[in-house]
Image: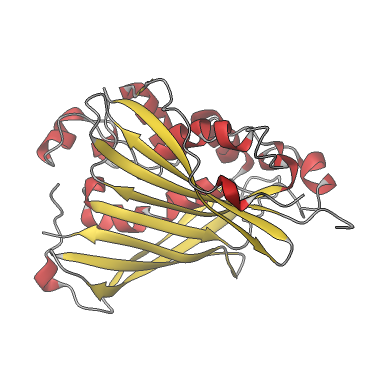
């Protein structure tokens, strides 16, 4: 069943704070084999003007992906997640995520389109720190392929 | 945020040093754990083929993470990346052997923007296929 465009603009409650740990950043940087010292060495990060180690540019997805569960599992929206693939991903940063951040994500359904029988859903995740300042926005576009026989 | 690359020394067409990133099954298991994305298409061959894939495929977000390293290694400060987006066009297929697959990434300056920023366009391929489309980063230069 096609997604209802009336859900565009639906905003979900901010998620409980995700506390970014220094070792979690290290674990992620090691997993993507990225040896940039700004991810693991506080002095190197400070030399670049950051108060603590920063996270790689795609790290925020770890947090926004969890938050988007609210949307993809929203029974009213009715997305068939078994047919979903990740189509596009974009981040717009005010600053890099860094160790010690306590981040909350507010998810908004930005758009719903139907293209050649596929449902295309864009979920915007606004990531803010403890003081409410913007850190990064994630735009995740999911494509639900047309079910067979539809 | 301090990049070591100076805006005035960069032209449209300036090429960033290209890189080649290896990815094996072990890499994908490690990335699954670090990212929390345990979709079996990234580690279970029987499952991957049952849903129509040729084999286990890399996480799109892993490929996205590798591609931007061409930018962050160039500017040194990861905080210089102010915008980054990709389209996942083709999967990176990762066979179950020691060599796995490779992701080849090149980038060049596509536009000089206001406020000493540039747009870098990236090209990422694996096994001769383009795996990312519209792969672009906006970078704050010095």
Quarter location, residue B67: bottom left
Quarter location, residue B135: bottom left
Residue B124 percent coordinates (x, y): 49, 64
Determine the residue positioned at 70% across, 41% down.
Answer: A81
Toward the viewer: A117 or A10? Answer: A10
Determine the residue positioned at 39% across, 36% down.
Answer: A29
Determine the residue positioned at 73% across, 55% down.
Answer: A145
Task: In the rendered view, tell whether residue A10 sits above or below residue B108.
Answer: above
Drawn side of residue B119 relative to residue A43, left or right: right
Toward the viewer: B52 or A66? Answer: A66
Residue A106 percent coordinates (x, y): 41, 34
Quarter location, residue B114: bottom left
Task: In the rendered view, tell whether residue B4 sits above or below residue B23.
Answer: below
Toward the viewer: A84 or A50? Answer: A84
Determine the residue positioned at 66% across, 54% down.
Answer: B93
Asked if residue B11 can be seen in this view, the reply is yes
- Quarter occupied by the C terminus of chain B: bottom left
Colour approach in the figure = secondary structure
**Residue placed furthest toward the right:** A149
Residue B80 percent coordinates (x, y): 22, 51
Asked if residue A59 can be seen in this view, the reply is no
Residue A60 percent coordinates (x, y): 39, 38
Toward the viewer: B112 or A120? Answer: A120
């Amino acid at each position: 069943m096609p997604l209802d465009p009336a859900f565009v603009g639906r905003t979900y409650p901010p998620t409980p704070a995700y506390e970014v740990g220094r070792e979690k950043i290290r674990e992620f940087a090691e997993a993507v084999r990225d040896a940039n010292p700004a991810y693991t060495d506080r002095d190197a990060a400070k030399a670049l003007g950051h108060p603590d180690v920063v996270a790689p540019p795609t790290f925020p997805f770890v947090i926004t992906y969890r938050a988007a569960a609210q949307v993809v599992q929203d029974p009213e929206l009715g997305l068939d997640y078994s047919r979903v693939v990740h189509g596009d991903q974009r981040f717009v940063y005010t600053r890099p995520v860094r160790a010690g951040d306590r981040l909350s994500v507010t998810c908004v359904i930005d758009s719903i389109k139907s293209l050649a029988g596929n449902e295309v859903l864009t979920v915007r995740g606004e990531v803010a720190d403890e003081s409410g300042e913007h850190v990064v926005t994630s735009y995740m576009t999911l494509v639900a392929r047309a079910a067979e026989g539809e | 945020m301090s990049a070591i690359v100076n805006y005035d020394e960069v032209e449209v067409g300036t090429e960033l040093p290209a890189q080649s990133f290896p990815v094996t099954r072990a890499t994908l298991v490690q990335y699954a754990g670090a990212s929390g994305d345990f979709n079996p298409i990234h580690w279970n061959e029987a499952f991957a083929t049952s849903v129509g894939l040729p084999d286990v495929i890399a996480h799109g977000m892993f490929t996205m993470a590798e591609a931007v390293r061409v930018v962050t290694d160039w500017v040194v400060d990861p905080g210089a990346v102010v915008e980054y987006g990709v389209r996942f066009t083709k999967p990176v297929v990762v066979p179950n052997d020691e060599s796995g697959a490779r992701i080849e990434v090149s980038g060049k300056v596509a536009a000089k923007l206001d406020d000493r920023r540039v747009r870098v366009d990236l090209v990422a391929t694996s096994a001769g296929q383009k795996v990312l489309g519209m792969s672009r980063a906006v970078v704050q230069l010095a």
